[in-house]
Image (spheres, rainbow, N blue to C red):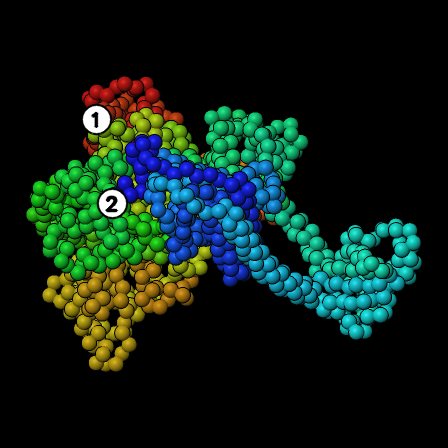
Amino acid sequence: MLDAFFIFTDSRTLPLLPGIYQPWLVALSILVAIVTSVVTLFMAGLAARTLSRSQRQMALLSGALFQGIGIWAMHFVGMLAFDLCTSVRYDLPLTLLSILPAFCASWVTLNMLASPRVSRPQLLLGGLLVGAGIGGMHYTGMAAMQMAPILRYAPGWFVFSLLIAILLATLSLWIRFGLRQLARLGEGRTNLLAGCIMGFAIAGMHYSGMLSARFIGVAEPAGRVMAENGKMAAVVALLTLCAGVLVLAGNALLRYRQLAAEKSAGEARLQAVVDTAVDGIISMDARGRVLEMNRAAELMFGWQSAELVGRNINMLMPEPYRSGHDAYLAHYLQTGDARVIGVGREVSARRKDGSVFPIRLAVGRVDTGREPMFVGFVTDISERTAMERELKLRESQYRTLIDNMPGVAFRSRVDQDWSKIFISDSISELCGWPAASFVDGSISLLSIMHPDDVQRVRDTVSQAVRDRHSYVVEYRLFHMAGGERWVSESAGIVFDLDEQPQWLDGVMIDITDSRLRAAEYEGVVYAIRQALAVVEFDMSGHILTANDSFLALTGYRLDELQGRHHRVLCQPEEVASSAYQTFWSGLRAGQFQSGEFLRQGKDGRQVWIQAVYNPILDLDGKPCKVVKLASDVTDRKHMEQDLMAARDRAEQASAAKGMFLANMSHEIRTPMNAIIGFAQLLLDGNLQPEQRRHLQTINQSARALLGLLNGVLDTAKLERGALELDEADYALHELCQQLVDAFALQARDKQLVLQLDYAADCPDLLYGDVLRMRQILTNLLGNAVKFTEHGQVVLQVRCQADRLHISVSDSGIGIAPDRLDSIFAPFSQADASMARRFGGTGLGTTIARQLVELMGGSIGVRSQLGVGTTFDISLPLQAACGSQQPGTATPTLALPPLRVLAVDDVPENLELLQLMLQREGLQVTTAGGGAEAVALHADQRFDVVLMDVQMPEVDGLEATRQLRAQEAHSGQPPTPVIALTASVLSQDRKDAEAAGMNGFAVKPLDMASLRQEIARVTGLSGAVADVSRSNSQQLALIDWDGALARWGEREVLVERIRRFLADNQAQLAALADADAVSCRQQAHRLRGLAANLGLAQLQQQLAGVEQAAACSPAQAEAIDTIMAGLAAALPASGTALVTEVADSTAAPLPAAARPWLQRVMAACGQASLDDEAMQALAALLPAASLHALQAALDDFDFDAALQAAHALMPDAAGETEAP
């Protein structure tokens, strides 16, 4: 097929026709190609500058058409320049069609040339298209030749001709774009050079193609005349030139119209700019007359343009500018001295209404060919001036803001050291160096930056400058005083008008603490992941990732779980339940979920887990994923199932134990009521010392037994959850002070320092159960004082957030580490010898723990053997609800002579109750049973009924119902009924209330509590007499009743008072001269001692001194008077006793008493009692001599008893043998 076009054999063997060229026609063809190319490139440039799309397309289309015609004309002229020695005709349609390839290639290339930028691939493509178009046109034109010889082509020259066209066309395009940019040539020169190269590309391709042509045939004798070819070539060239002229003329006309339109539009825009300009524009002639002014100037000055045109412009100027304007203008026109022309300045202007306002004025000169014209541009800077004032104020505010804002604000140059233009004074707090040192360059930030951070900071800042964005970087700075500080710097880059970085504006914040917390947090997270199974879910419940612990728990691999839903781990029935949907709905709503769940592993095994599902919130506060923390509790669940049956059995046993304890309590409290009551009645009478001592022993032992019973009952109630808190507002500080005061003398006897450390930020008033709080602190303080031989005991109270922290610390014997875990167990002590040495049941700490936990708190113990022990209590901090003031004491009530009906089936109890009530001044009627009480109530009127609950035949509940029935039948008002019972069950209280009883009193009866209950049910609580008085003259000098209740024996109390007067006389006298702090401290200590000794008047005076932190002369005089009265009162009440004591202690020990005393010492060494020996000693020695020994034995304090025995027989140390 290719044989029809190419010759693949040696052409020298073929009959080839020779041909010759006419040089001038060849030159004409090249000229046509060059002219055509230059014109075409000019058209491309014209199209690129044309804004109208249609005009651009017209220019490109006409240029492409002219380029196609030019290529065709060059080819045709080149063919006419070749004489082939044969007649040649051309196929007209094919000849005209040959223009098409050149036109198409030129169209594509010109569109490319009209673009502002051309890439290298586009440049190569354009050259290829132009070369191909030239080649296509040439060989299509050659195919239009009709002649006798056969036309064939040499393949090599054929390819070479195309390469010549493509390479030269590409070179021409590169010159058009690349060389123009590199050499900075003008558009005309570039188009001329590129057109020449393009013309040579067209001609080169043509004549290279002619070299590839082989005309095979025989020459004809009569060939065409070359002269005719020359005429034809001239005609073709002339027509081509005409076409070019037409194309240029048409495009020039279009360009002219475009420029005219642009000029009109520009003038319109200019006029619009002038009319709409914000600044005023005023023109004037050389004589200063206004020629024209825009709308902005009219609004600015208040004049209409028609009012000012033709008038002197100095009308718009205030003095002194107005008077000197014309002279200045004339001077300028004569000398050319332009002091104002061409310079912007700020001056004042005058409105039509005469008001003056600040403007910025710039005046320019316009030469019109005749006389000059001046144009003034006026800007109203009233707002700017106001803004400048405001900015100055703002600058001052910003300066204050920067000085007070957290962190260090700075502005740095973008240089090697980031030298500081400005830095706030707070830099001195961050690194120790003053701000001035950074500004003057004596120190730079880099010089105090940690070396390991310098390069990283440089890279961060450099990258931010290159990318033109802000940056945040963290690094370390060395403090001038030593140490490192972590800093977070955030800053932005400010660029100037040349887009060069000018400075850095930012702030540095000290993040040392947050870095430490972050490191701690990371450690916590790592520890959690190590200790727990962790898995993450998206909000739809699909697994994102899981740690190794979770995979080990479920038996899956991570790739087996990722992307699967949470339900793969759940039981089918759980997934199908509505609770499961609610569970995930709650998580999607951000709700925390936790609990124990049954999960299914890979192998189908069931695993119980304790898990928490934590929704993680994004920056908008919306849940973005769920993190689950889980631990395997399968073994525990199995254990729980095994313990269920045991728990049921234990609950049954506990219920039985509770009932037994309740019954035991009732049976013990009934005789205890008589023992304590009658003992107290006898103690209130006149007794011999030995009788009083024995009765006090009975009373103390009974009360100790009652305390033990209460402790056992409290423990039982707490264990089964039957104890309820009676919460109300109470003063914690006062309670703590009362307890410290109560234990102060006991601590002083042991030479201990007892302190109360109550934080100032803790509230005095709290809400809670004051009785249980007192019980807790009494147990802990009592243990601390009991088990501390020397040193101190501290009661400390602190508040933190919503928690109350109380600690009781001592420097006592301590607790061995192996006994700490059991210290809160019932009936347990740190050592078996503790019970022998110090006494006690071991229930105190148990009850304290149970009560603290009941209050929602926790208690712990820290101890070191031989060093001391600290009990720590943490409770919820509940603020008081009411407005009760701390320190408000409950008044002592005095009842009026009420008519009382006392009902009890036990004669001893009834007798005791009658004696106690009659001593209070009440009128008492007794009844031995419920039926008798009902009968008496029917015949007489009583103010209150004291009704025993458990009685034979008609019990107290039934009797009360009958009383209420009588009252309802007769229309009488109900008589208050108080239940008397030894039972402590809450159900009994409810039964009493249901039967119609109004009050409740527990046996053994406490007269103070019973008095309060009677006052309450009879409505006398608000009207009862308060025996306390507002001044010391109405108080007793010594409150013997209250003091004896605390001390037990009068002689011991008298001795204590004497010691108080002797030891503290100087301190009391020094109060008047002490400073506020010392005065308050001394008054507080002395007030506590006085309160324990019953020195009522002295206590009240010291309370006033403590509150005022000063001792006035009147108070000092009152204290001296009281002290004198005490000194005078003591001999009358205790002289004989003291003398007796002095005589007895001074007398030698009788020989008969020595062996009995040795037996007592031996028994004490074995932590036991020898009652026979004590009875013998009581018969041989005065009671005062045995007081200390007997008191120690009554308290089961065997160490103190040994010391007292040695004091009686100093030479008996070490003798422990019995006779």
Q: Which residue lies furthest to the front in this view?
A: 221
Position of residue 422 measured from the top left corner of the image (x, y, whole percent): 63, 38
Camera sees residue 952: yes
Badges 1 and 2: C-beta atoms under 8 Å apart?
no
- What residue is at 37 percent from the left and 48 percent from the top? 147
Q: Residue 250 carries which label?
A: none
Element at label 1: loop
Report, in whole angstroms, how far the alpha carbon at label 1 lies from the one at label 2. 71 Å
Amino acid type shown at disc 2: Leu
Name the residue nearer the viewer: 859 or 241: 241
- What residue is at 40 percent from the left and 51 percent from the top? 89
Position of residue 659 measured from the top left corner of the image (x, y, whole percent): 13, 53
Position of residue 1183 measured from the top left corner of the image (x, y, whole percent): 32, 35
Q: Which image quarter: residue 1009? A: bottom left
Element at label 2: strand
Position of residue 1144 measured from the top left corner of the image (x, y, whole percent): 37, 30
Question: Dot 1 surroundings within 10 Å: few (below 14), some, or many (20 or more)?
Answer: few
Q: How many labels does the image show?
A: 2
Q: Is residue 676 above or below residue 355?
A: above
- Residue identified by numbered label 1: 1166
- Which badge, 1 or 2, is on the more N-terminal residue? 2
- Which label lies toward us, 1 or 2? 2
Amino acid type shown at disc 1: Gln
Instruction: Say whether residue 294 is left or right of residue 969.
Output: right
Q: Quadrant of the N terminus?
A: top left
- What residue is at 26 percent from the left and 57 percent from the top? 586
Camera sees residue 1082: no
Q: Which mark is residue 544?
A: 2
Name the residue nearer the viewer: 1057 or 1080: 1080
Name the residue nearer the viewer: 251 or 334: 251
Q: Which residue lies furthest to the bottom in this view?
A: 970
